[in-house]
Amino acid sequence: MTEKISSSLRESKSARWFVLILVSFTMMCMYYLTDAMAPLQQNLQTNLSWSATDYGLFTSGYGWFNVFLLMLVFSGMILDKLGTRFTGILAIFIMILGAGIKYWAISGHITGTTELVIGSWKALGSTPRSALFAGLGFGIFGVGCEMFGIAANKAVVRWFKGKEMALAIGLNTSTGRIGTALAMFTPLPLYNLTKDVSAPILVSILLLCLGLLVFIFFTVLDKRLDKEESDAGVAAEEEFKFTDVRDIALNRAFWYIAILCVLFYSAVFPFIKFATNLIVQKFSVTDTFAGYIPALLPFSALLLTPLFGGISDKKGKAATIMIMGSILLVFVHLLFSIPSLNSFPIAIGLVVLLGIAFSLVPSAMWPSVAKIIPHSKLGTAYAMIFWVQNIGLMLVPLLIGAVLDKYCIIGTITKIVDGKEQHLTQYNYTIPMLIFACFGVLAIGFAYLLKAEDKKKGYGLEKPNVVE
């Protein structure tokens, strides 16, 4: 029996790293659409007559169904009940559907405005229907995207538990960041080439179809691992029960990680959504070139997340790493908020530092969940964390967009683009940067609480992941 186990796919170093490549490639395809519209904020506002609030509403659509309909929690239950393979393929089909609706809305098929009314309260005034339907498509995509994210995490944990788990999760995450990086600097050239603001979404749909084919190949290998472990007498996972949700919810360390997650990512992902416009306006960089600077963030994460994950595997100190990343996050956003710091090299340096923070926290945070929660409940646990995270990813872009329109307009400039006169709104981004910094301060507090809870309960967050 020992020989069978030792010769299984999971024990083969080349096999498990090949599996990681397959899963991570699909993650990369998925992340491209998540941020493909970020460099085109000004173009969306100009071409579709959106305001910053409308853009924030569209961006917030990513979390509508995940938050209000608890789709993420249901996704976790589906994952723990029906497995990684079924959940991953279902997630990709949902993403393709959402991307199709988003493409239809932004490509000019929807015109006119509507009033968003909640009871007797007019929530956002007159809102372009294109923004609402684009948000709807983004919301459907978000369901599939988060569903695939938790499935990918659970797959990596399964193949790497007791091995290089933090390094593998870090590589999976950072490969996904390649998609984010591509989404920072390819949409504007695509727009300039096609004069179609929806062109990056069409590219995204093609990438998702390719990601589907790659993931199907992963399912073949994963199914073979099931058979090998069954033949070797490895015990099957405990069946998912609805009481698992209660057990997870009663775990204090779980909530510290969940709240740390939402605070940290609320200071990063919404920043990326507005970063290109911020850099254009504060650092006097051209639209085309501005997308390259935020792209440094995911590229930094691509290189550094595996490095920090490897350190966590061998040395431990996961809670300490999360504290360090949160402190660096605050430092970067505070410097971004200072109006006089507006030189181009400073923008590059701050984005690289933010990339380091963006590497530190995820490389330690996601493997830590697997130490706190049993593997049979891990899909549900990741889903609940992602659900909390989506609350932030939904509300913070709305908040930032509204703050920009209400408090940060400093004037307008007129430009001639393709022979047409365009009036571009100018913003001062100091207040949004201070809001992001406040999220970082709160994240530091919860990272300290997590470290104290680990010391009290002995989860082993400060211990190495690799079992010798």
Image (cartoon, rainbow, N blue to C red):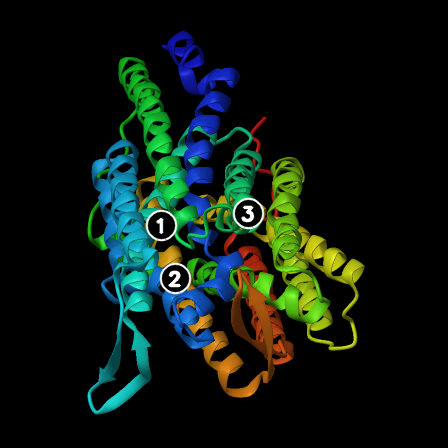
Name the residue tied to disc 3: 189
- The disc placed on residue 346 is none
Which marked residue is nearer to the observer: mark 1 or mark 3?
Answer: 3
Q: Residue at x 23, y 53 (%)?
A: 74
Q: Position of residue 4 (x, y in %)?
A: 38, 9
Q: Quadrant of residue 392?
A: bottom left
Residue 142 in the image: above or below residue 43? above
Question: The N terminus lies in which quarter of the figure?
Answer: top left
User: Relative to the observer, which residue lies in front, 363 or 334?
Assistant: 334
Q: Which residue is mark 1?
A: 146
C-beta proximity under 8 Å, tags 1 and 3: no
Task: Report the disc number at residue 390.
Answer: 2
Q: Mark 3 is on which residue type?
A: Pro
Residue 250 appearing in the image: no
Which quarter of the picture shows residue 291?
bottom right
Determine the residue positioned at 54% across, 65% down. Answer: 274
Verify CB contact (< 8 Å) between mark 3 and mark 2. Answer: no
Foreground residue among 228 and 149? 149
Mark-to-mark CA distance, 3 and 2: 30 Å
Task: State which tag comes first along the sequence, 1 or 2.
Answer: 1
Q: Is residue 56 above or below residue 123?
A: above
Above or below, comparing residue 209 to residue 426 in the picture: above
Neighbour class for label 1 at 10 Å: few (<14), some, many (≥20)? many
Q: Residue furthest front?
A: 419
- Nearer the observer, 409 or 153: 409
Please report the residue visible at 38 percent of the width from the left and 50 percent of the height from the top.
382
Q: Pointers 1 and 2 in contact (CB under 8 A)?
A: yes
Distance of label 1 from label 2 (alpha carbons): 9 Å
Tell whether 458 sits left or right of 124: right
